[in-house]
Image (cartoon, helix red, strand yellow):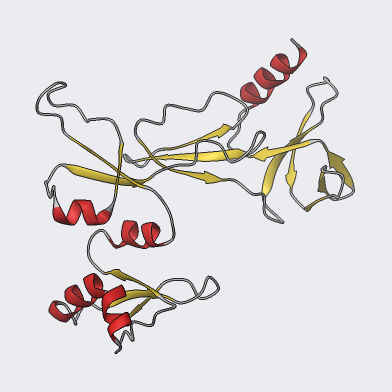
Amino acid sequence: MTLRQATKHKKVIRWWLDNTDLGVWEKCNEKDGWYLTHEPKFLLNCKYAINDEFAKFRKAEADGKQIQYRMIDHFERVGQYTDWTNTTMDEYDNSFQYDDVEFRIKPDICIKPGDWVYVKYSNGLKKIARCDEKLPNLDDAISLEKWIPKCGETCVFWDNDGHNEYFIAQYKSKSSDGTFNYDEETFDNVAPLEVTYEMIEKRDKQLKS
């Protein structure tokens, strides 16, 4: 191991020397992604992450994601959680190791107008919302996941013609003109099956107003 390697990965190396039985996470390219190794070479062109209870967040941070934390407020809003605050895993390791700290990967509030997203919460609940509408409360959200229809997935289809006709069918593909296909039919819009007719109709009314 060269001095450059030891300097670049020194934090992970120090942890690994005390926890060789646990291994470390390694990522050398996007195709292979992260994988657990017990024989890390600590290469200069690879990323490494400690394999502890916060490995998920360490890997995300190494991939350029922003990590946030919140904790039980013992001063102003006693017994309630503080607001989500940006942090780094180094800051957590060096400064404030408390039992009541929660972490999350900062969600992207909106991918782009028109996208459907799943809002996932720390209590396990998951809600669907569209980015050109008001999103559900994000205070307790731990992630936003863009919904992309898959071939064969059962979805809701409708057009922008104001007739409020909705069809449930299996998604096939997206055309070059931006419409969505199932069998031989094409539609202006497609949404996850979890989307209720009330949500779609509400959006149609907003478009007409």
Which quarter of the figure has residue 125? top left
Front residue of this view, candidates 49 and 205: 49
* Left or right of 73 in this view: 30: right
Residue 130 x, y percent position in the rendering: 60, 32
Looking at this rendering, what residue extends furthest in the top direction? 209
Residue 109 x, y percent position in the rendering: 50, 36
Quarter of the picture containing the N terminus is bottom left
Residue 129 x, y percent position in the rendering: 55, 32
Quarter of the picture containing the C terminus is top right
Front residue of this view, candidates 2 and 195: 2
* Left or right of 75 in this view: 42: right
Residue 68 x, y percent position in the rendering: 32, 43
Vertical order, 75 against 37 (above or below):
above
Vertical order, 3 against 180 (above or below):
below
Looking at this rendering, what residue extends furthest in the right direction? 184
Vertical order, 173 against 161 (above or below):
below
Residue at 53% across, 70% down: 30
Front residue of this view, candidates 39 and 146: 39
Which quarter of the figure has residue 199? top right
* Left or right of 58 in this view: 177: right
Residue at 78% across, 22% down: 164
